[in-house]
Image (cartoon, grey):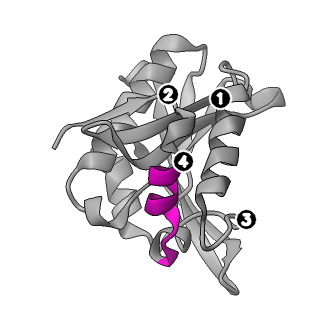
Amino acid sequence: MICRIRKWELSDARDLAMAISNKKIQNNLRDGLPYPYTEQDGAVFISDMLSADENETFAFAITIDNKVIGSIGVFRQGNIHRLTAELGYYIAEEYWGRGIMTEAVRQTCEYVFDNSDIIRIYAEPFAYNIASCRVLEKAGFQYEGTLRNNAVKNGKIIDMKMYSMLKAEI
């Protein structure tokens, strides 16, 4: 299966809602997403991504055969971290474990490094999300350390891991 990243289209809202309206996925993401996630929620998100500053927000649909199966984005940080950006992503559960997300991460990082002045992309998966940590490692990210007691998710205090990729390393 070959995945591609592409800019969002408003017509992607239905596929997006089907991909993310899953507690197993939402348990690995930051809080604030509605559940169930509706097509209208997807339309609002896509509209926000399409209207965002393209030098600050690099947001893409992850597709297989032009069907949206997930989302990936790189978000520039501010102030002294203005050349750094945070990576976030997810794909529908039926596509887990197939190397698709690793390929999407590679494509996205290459795009951001080639089309911006960003020099560092980082990700902070929950420490218990071993699959996400593995995606980052396979995509070439370096493990920098564990952020102890760094988040509260589903009522539990949890560790997160810090990974990064530098433009100079690719």
Amino acid at dot 1? Leu
Circle 1/circle 2 CB separation < 8 Å: yes
Amino acid at dot 4? Ala
Q: Residue at x 80, y 31 (%)?
A: 78
Amino acid at dot 3? Gly
Q: CA distance from mark 3 to mark 2?
A: 23 Å
Q: Which residue is mark 1?
A: 50
Looking at the image, residue 98 sits to the left or right of residue 145; the answer is left
Q: Which residue is mark 4?
A: 13
**Secondary structure beneath disc 2?**
loop
Q: Residues within 10 Å of mark 4 (few under 14, many from 20)?
A: many
Most foreground residue, 48 or 153? 48
Residue 147: give x, y in percent of width and height. 62, 64
Quarter that holds the N terminus: top left
Visible residue check, residue 129: yes
Whether 45 is among the magenta residues is no
Q: Which residue is mark 2?
A: 7
- Answer above or below: position of 4 versus 150: above
Q: Residue at x 66, y 20 (%)?
A: 54
Residue 138: give x, y in percent of width and height. 27, 47
Residue 104: give x, y in percent of width and height. 35, 39
